[in-house]
Image (cartoon, coloured by chain):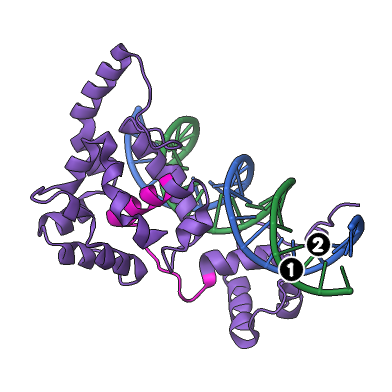
Chain colours: A purple, B green, C blue
DNA sequence: AACGAGCACAACCGCACGATC
DNA sequence: CGATCGTGCGGTTGTGCTCGT
């Protein structure tokens, strides 16, 4: 009883995809479409399981994928969405056409999580981490001293900083995003910096306020 | 130049769920 | 109505690259 595995692993290739394999899969799907993932590798002449082909297509080969690092603004939206949706990466990714759930999940685990922890925010609850007073004070001092360094080194921030600092207008922030729906989301929600009028550096303001999440609440209807 | 640590990302695994038989 | 199938999802692991020593 129980489910059969999606494929027997006998004779099937695993590990990183080669360019020839990518070409085979890409050509097959572009010419024939996707009827049944299980049949795709057989018909395309690949020694992979259907699941592996599906993953490769979704996360890497799809023509509509957006390449490049996630922007600071996209990170903000991800954090907000995560506070509402939790680890439902596919739901979060649905707000970023061209981005994959895997990509967002990886970005969360490798960068945003650390960023939040560093700022004293629990990535799970999105609330300030409970600490005794001594530790709180110590962490607070460390954060103050390291905020700039964090922004400059850890977060690949300067590029975005330039974009943001060059203008306080929402349109400029939108221009700093790639075209696509995240940009549209920002246009619809009048951008995040509308909540901090007059603040030249939204990032500095953001990290100084653990309850910054409240500022996002008005955006909820636009997202959910 | 060689090595190891840390990091980012690609890929795999196992489970859940809806559809179909 | 239960068994099976196909697919999607989230957690985890593997791999390759970069950087510091």
How many residues crowd around disc 1 within 10 Å: few (fewer than 14), some, or many (20 or more)? Answer: some
Dot 2: chain letter: A
State left or right for residue A73 relative to residue C8: left
State left or right for residue A62 relative to residue A76: right
How many residues crowd around disc 2 within 10 Å: few (fewer than 14), some, or many (20 or more)? Answer: few
Earlier sequence position, callout 1 versus callout 2: 2
Toward the top, the furthest residue is: A134
A151 shown above or below A17: above
Which one is in front, A90 or C2? C2
Label at residue A47: 1
Spot occupied by residue B21 in the image (x, y as percentages of width and height): 89, 74
Is residue A215 on the magenta stretch? no
Spot occupied by residue A52 in the image (x, y as percentages of width and height): 67, 63
Q: CA distance from mark 1 to mark 2?
A: 7 Å
Spot occupied by residue A174 in the image (x, y as percentages of width and height): 22, 65
Dot 1: chain letter: A
Spot occupied by residue A81 in the image (x, y as percentages of width and height): 41, 51
A156 shown above or below A101: above
Residue at the spot x=63%, y=78% of the render?
Answer: A24
Q: Which residues are magenta?
A: A61-83
Is residue A75 on the magenta stretch? yes
Say whether marks 1 and 2 touch (CB < 8 Å): yes
Q: Secondary structure at mark 1?
A: loop
Residue at the spot x=41%, y=64% of the render?
Answer: A96
Label at residue A11: 2
Residue at the spot x=42%, y=37% of the render?
Answer: A123
């Amino acid at each position: 009883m129980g489910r059969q595995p999606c494929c027997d692993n006998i004779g099937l290739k695993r590990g990183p995809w080669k360019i020839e394999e990518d070409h085979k899969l890409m050509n097959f799907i572009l010419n024939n479409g996707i009827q049944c993932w299980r049949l795709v590798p057989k018909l395309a002449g690949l020694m992979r399981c259907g699941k592996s082909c599906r993953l490769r297509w979704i996360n890497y080969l799809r023509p509509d994928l957006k390449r490049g690092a996630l922007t600071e603004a996209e990170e903000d939206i991800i954090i907000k969405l995560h506070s509402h949706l939790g680890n439902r990466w596919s739901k979060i990714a649905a707000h970023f056409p061209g981005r994959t759930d895997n990509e967002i999940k990886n970005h969360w685990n490798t960068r945003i999580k650390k960023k939040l922890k560093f700022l004293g925010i629990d990535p799970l609850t999105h609330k300030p981490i409970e600490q005794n007073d001594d530790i709180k004070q110590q962490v607070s001092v460390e954060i103050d001293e390291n905020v700039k360094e964090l922004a400059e080194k850890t977060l690949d921030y300067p590029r975005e900083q330039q974009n943001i600092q060059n203008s306080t207008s929402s349109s400029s922030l939108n221009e700093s995003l790639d075209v696509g729906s995240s940009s549209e989301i920002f246009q619809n929600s009048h951008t995040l910096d509308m909540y901090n009028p007059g603040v030249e550096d939204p990032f500095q303001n953001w990290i100084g306020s653990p309850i910054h999440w409240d500022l996002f609440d008005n955006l909820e209807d636009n997202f959910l």
